[in-house]
Amino acid sequence: MEKQVIGKNVEKIDALALATGQPVYADDIKLPNTLHIKFLYSPHANAIIEDIDTTEAEKLPGVHMVLTYKNTPQVYHTTAGQGWPEPSPYDTCMFNQHVRFVGDRVAAVAAESEEIALEALKLIKVKYNVLPAVFDPEEAMKEGAPIIHEENPQGTYDAKRNLVAHIEVKAGDVEKGFEEADVVVEHTFETQFAQHCPIETHATISYLDENGRIVIRSSTQVPFHVRRIVAQVLGIPVSQIRVIKPRIGGGFGSKQEIILEEVCAFVTMKTGRPARAVYTREEEFISSRTRHPMKITVKIGAKKDGRFTAIKMYALSNTGAYGTHGLTVASNTGSKTLPLYNKAPNVEFVADVVYTNLPVPGAYRGYGATQGYACLEQTVDMVAEKLGLDPIAIRKINHIRKGETSPIFEALGEGREGVVQYIESEAVDKLLELGAKEIGFYEKWGKKVRNGSKVRGVGMSLHMQGSGIPKIDMGSASIKLNEDGSVNVLYGGTDIGTGLDTVVAQIVGEVLGIDPKKVIVYPSDTDITPFDKGAYASSGTFISGSAVYNTALKLRDQILEVAKDMFGEQDSKDYILKDGFVISPRSGKRVSLSEIAYDTFYVKKQKQIMAVGSFVSESSPPPFAAHFVEIEVDEETGVITPIKYVAAVDCGVVINPELTKGQIIGAIVNGIGYALTEEYKFGENGKVLNPNFMEYRIPSSRDIPEIVPILVETYEPTGPLGAKSVSEININGPIPAIGNALYDALGIRLGSSPYTPDKVLKALKEKRK
Amino acid sequence: MKVHYKINGKDYEFDIHPGKVLLDVLRENGFTEVKGNCYMGTCGACTVLINGTPKTSCTVLAAQINGAEITTVKGLGDILNPHPLQKAFVEKGAVQCGYCTPGTILAAYALLKENPNPTDEDIKKAIDGNLCRCTGYVQQVEAIKYAITLLKEGK
């Protein structure tokens, strides 16, 4: 059918407000009598608080509360904003007597101003019993290692061995598969701690409404999970809490956590006053969330013709001091990567998720798949080389195709068994061909073009991800019709800057045949909108979009029913909704949605035309992406410069091309940062040494190569109007694609990311030996 | 101490603590369009024009610039009458979360005042200090180029 609204570059509906500086973010409103909250952090990686004296701090004029483990609820919970029951362990208290990393919270002060709160922090006296710490996950699993969570948290696999989770999934017999293979390649690759770096840091404001309920205005990706978890921690009913999500200044997973909300709400509950907590950039690095570093080994066996006989992946994940998202991120390391090569009949995935005394990883765009692909896609290139095949050819032989499935889908979900899934939309061969053509892969690959000390190389990698968590993630919406033919959409989904509200307006506009400007979108407010699991798992367009789509269809039926009556016709099945009208092609009669609303408000069968709908998916249809990069490496300095980056992406039907491109390019640049420069540096005591943008380098405008996103449309029957997801998948490419390009240029492979100049130079030196 | 500024064309007097940085003074007095957080001048979100020159307001002492003319993104245009740069950012998909947008637009505005015909490299250099984690910069550069066209057409 002809598309009216989707597929068009509808302007992002909040963009002008943002570009003109409207007060839209959590910290842009100022409430009278607000208490400002600041935190005291542990200087030790592992310690028991023997004594904490807050009397001097409490005496400081302007200080209202000093919070410690002594006067706050000791409710063990998870900070992971995930569906209930949470797959992450209950290992965190608001404040704990046992502090487990440099940056763990010791206390907080709520005062009349930030300055007073900071002063008061200096007056808190803490006596620590410093314990031995462990930073390496392999060491942490050994007998005799410090036990980080002596309380044996609910939901951990083996707290005595610091094991949050152990995953083992098998299909076929990998050992037999390796025996049958003509070549076997094994490769180990380590990825690093990294921070999401949304430009808006975490910010929460809480206050009491006129009826004494707690209102939390927070920079969150998961307002409904915030409500549930804060209620759990504070021991009050969900009905006593309202969570409002204002505009969010980026999240990328870091705001899928309950970090400030429970503290603010507690202060408001105890004092009756508004409370405000805003993290500084340094606090973001030290005490918010990071990416799970992993050490991954991939072993692939293949026949001479290139067909894989077996794939085995082992992932060792460092989940820092707390296990938030530990199990599920590691699950995705296998589940979002291994099905891509379903030609291998024998597949095995094993993962260990381990506590250490380091900052806390959580959800981060790519969610484990980034780490998995970093190793897998370099190993695939190594197999191809052994077989004398090119990187594209080996992927064409082995990739999953439309109509096919993988045993991994069923065996491995997010922290539990998965579901059987068949690929219903896929254009991988086309992605590979278009991407190769755009970068000039076959003209450049293996040529090592040299200019002085600089050598060029090209590399590529292939990816799939998923859209939403099947049978878990649910979204819902309600829509009502107004007398000018506009509609109000209330949906629980959470636009964190991606453009989801606009996509929602387009989906509703498409179904109802109205200009998206007539779709007034009101997102996630736990009092007002129906439930949605929030913004994660690449689910915005797919889950929230489907909820809105289902709801719009119901509204459409109600509209058609009224139109049928107005036309005096028997049935409405061939009616068309277009340009704000309902049209009967049979009779040529037409009536506007405005007239329908007036009729139902004031004239006949008076009622509000309104619908509620929900969506939960049975599957997680994967988007696919083929990434290609041309780099230049300077043999003298070791510096890698990306010259051109091409991402050919199948994300189903494209709802808004400009927004889609924005998601692709943004993820690539984030991934390039992760591949080349971004890493935490730790001191010997586990302290973060570079918690600022001077020393932790994220890409700036002058660091980016030419980037070409290529959208290849397919139709995904389970998605809203044929759409799949696009936001996460494109962060997965830069590490393997640049790694493969580095091998093409210099014949070296680095064992870890980021690909810093010193590692390149060291590898070159070793090669020359 | 008291300081006077002309902000977006209007005169203001604020009673401030001498140690405060401009970013905090502006935000506390309702100019919340100025974003911030790094307090090191490294992210550029808090960029304002001080006497026409883009500066990170988190590294400027408010007392130091008594009498200055300050322009925030609201000084360029508002939601009913946006500046061509604001329109171009909207149209070219250069606004995602929008948190860096005011600072980046001001940096671009200062560039175009000085150099109405910048190259891509000039543009990238001008916004180099304005970190963006969402867009990957490509659409921002496109938007600034498009704004040049709009400005020339007098839109």
Image (cartoon, helix red, strand yellow):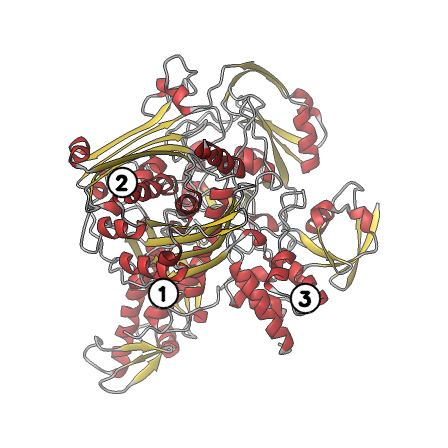
Give the percent coordinates (x, y) of residue A68.
56, 24
In-front residue for pair A600/A420: A420
> Pointer 3 and pointer 2: residues touching (CB < 8 Å)?
no
Chain letter of mark 2 equals: A
* Residue that label 3 marks: B112
Left or right of residue A454, residue A715 in this image: left
On the rendered image, what quadrant is the N terminus of chain B found in?
top right
Left or right of residue A105, residue B33 in this image: right
Left or right of residue A184, residue B147 in this image: right
The relative height of residue B119 versus residue A40 in the rendered view (above or below) is below
Give the percent coordinates (x, y) of residue A213.
50, 43
Q: Secondary structure at mark 3?
A: helix
Residue A237 visible, this orientation: no
Between the residue at mark 3 and the residue at mark 2, the CA separation in whole angstroms equals 52 Å
Q: Nearer the viewer, mark 2 or mark 1?
A: 2
Chain letter of mark 1 equals: A
Between the residue at mark 1 and the residue at mark 3, the CA separation in whole angstroms equals 38 Å
* Residue that label 2 marks: A413
Res A444 quadrant in image = bottom left
Give the percent coordinates (x, y) of residue A560.
27, 74
* Residue that label 1 marks: A507
